[in-house]
Amino acid sequence: MSWQQRIEQALSERREAQAFRSRQPLEQGAGRWLVRGERRYCNFSSNDYLGLSQHPQVIQAWQQGAEQYGVGSGGSGHVTGYHHAHQCLEEQLADWLNYDRALLFISGFAANQATIAALAGREDRIVADRLSHASLLEAATLSPAQLRRFQHNDSQHLSRLLAAPTDGQQLVVTEGVFSMDGDGAPLADIAAAARDAKAWLMVDDAHGIGINGASGRGSCHQQGVHPELLVVTFGKAFGLSGAAVLCSQDVADYFLQFARHLIYSTAMPPAQAAALQAALAVIRSDDGQQRREKLAQHVAAFRHGAQGLDFALTDSQSAIQPLIVGDNQQTLVLAEQLREQGCWVTAIRPPTVPAGTARLRLTLTAAHEPQDIDLLLEVLHGNRQ
Ligand SMILES: *Cc1c(COP(=O)(O)O)cnc(C)c1O
């Protein structure tokens, strides 16, 4: 089959499965509103959980950073790209999360790829929650190590997989809050299973950092767990983008030698690192606490009001509140109906989620007002006048 034929076949299979993806350019996509062309929708699709993408202090920090440093970093951090703004942010993150070191990456995807690629060798085994994010599972699949997946959130299954003989080291991989179901991991049990097997634990807390635990220190802090590798990302509650890996002194030095995504890639703009410091300051402040409380109120109101709908809620207590519809086509139709009535929601279909579990992935944020949650519920119940 030629390249062209192979591509045409893959596209037509996607279309037939009602799973063809496309993108829409927007005027605004993060915050309370989503603006597309002339029309404004209440935005239930962004990961901007605390509304920080529009926070005046964060915007100002980015502007001032751009004036101070210019807009680009000028190179890899190993050449000229590493600035005081990066160093300062890394120190603040390490101090806040109680690690020796933090290393910045341009995205969570890159951080996960780099971490797994730099660590896992041929003799090793990666044991990952089967619902882990694509960036983790793909990195594990690409690595020369063996990949085993444990049943979602099942620490006993994890222990059984870890008990199989191995000549190498074992790395347990999971998330703080799962991106498609919104549920949290039993991190204390998972950490205990890893410790018993002398495995290291890597937790990706993309959806927990800034939200869970005291002052938003995340799911691990909340559950009293200190994994050897903690990945936090800045595209969600921080309202920007980028990521950091928190680790020991030696592991950080090791990554500076062997993490190819750090060495062969342009560092994030220093102005962005300055804006991330401002976002972190908000997260740690009373303002941040009030935003977390407001978000929790929205989640409670939504879950209460969503009882009696035809669609299943998950166990999620997080900002991610999926409604499991099942059928791809029905999910698309429902998403369209909600949009017509002013609520922007995203239909998530296989292969992003398991077959037969197509869903509306609703996200609530501190940027919403109570009347936004009421509107969403009215539309879902079909009661909107
Ligand atoms: C969003 C997400 C990522 C990717 O982070 P980016 O910074 O968007 O590349 C990684 N892991 C999880 C669990 C995520 O939800």
Image: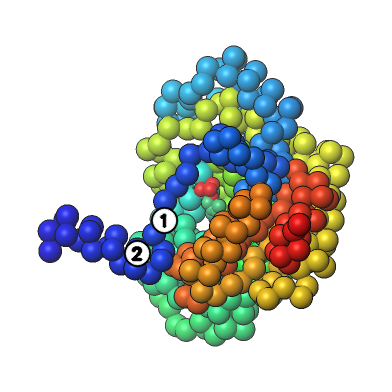
Q: Is residue 342 visible?
A: yes
Under tag 2, what secondary structure? helix
Residue furthest to the front: 385
Residue 296 falls left or right of residue 144: right
For the residues marked 1 and 2, what is the alpha-carbon distance in whole angstroms? 8 Å
10 Å crowding of disc 2: few (<14), some (14-19), many (20+)? few
Q: Which residue is mark 1?
A: 21
Asked if the residue under mark 2 is in contact with the one under mark 1, i.e. CB atoms within 8 Å, the reply is yes
Q: What amino acid does circle 2 point to?
A: Arg
At which x and y percent is residue 35? 60, 38
At which x and y percent is residue 63? 63, 20
Q: Quadrant of the C terminus?
A: bottom right
In this view, 35 is above or below 307: above
Question: Which residue is at 64% across, 65% downward?
Answer: 322
Q: How many marks?
A: 2
Instruction: Looking at the picture, tell me which residue is in the foreground, 6 or 171.
Output: 6
In this view, 267 is above or below 320: above
Q: Which residue is mark 2?
A: 14
In this view, 157 is above or below 67: below
At which x and y percent is residue 263? 41, 38
At which x and y percent is residue 64? 65, 18
Question: Which residue is at 53% across, 70% downward?
Answer: 330
Question: Which residue is at 39% across, 59% downward?
Answer: 20
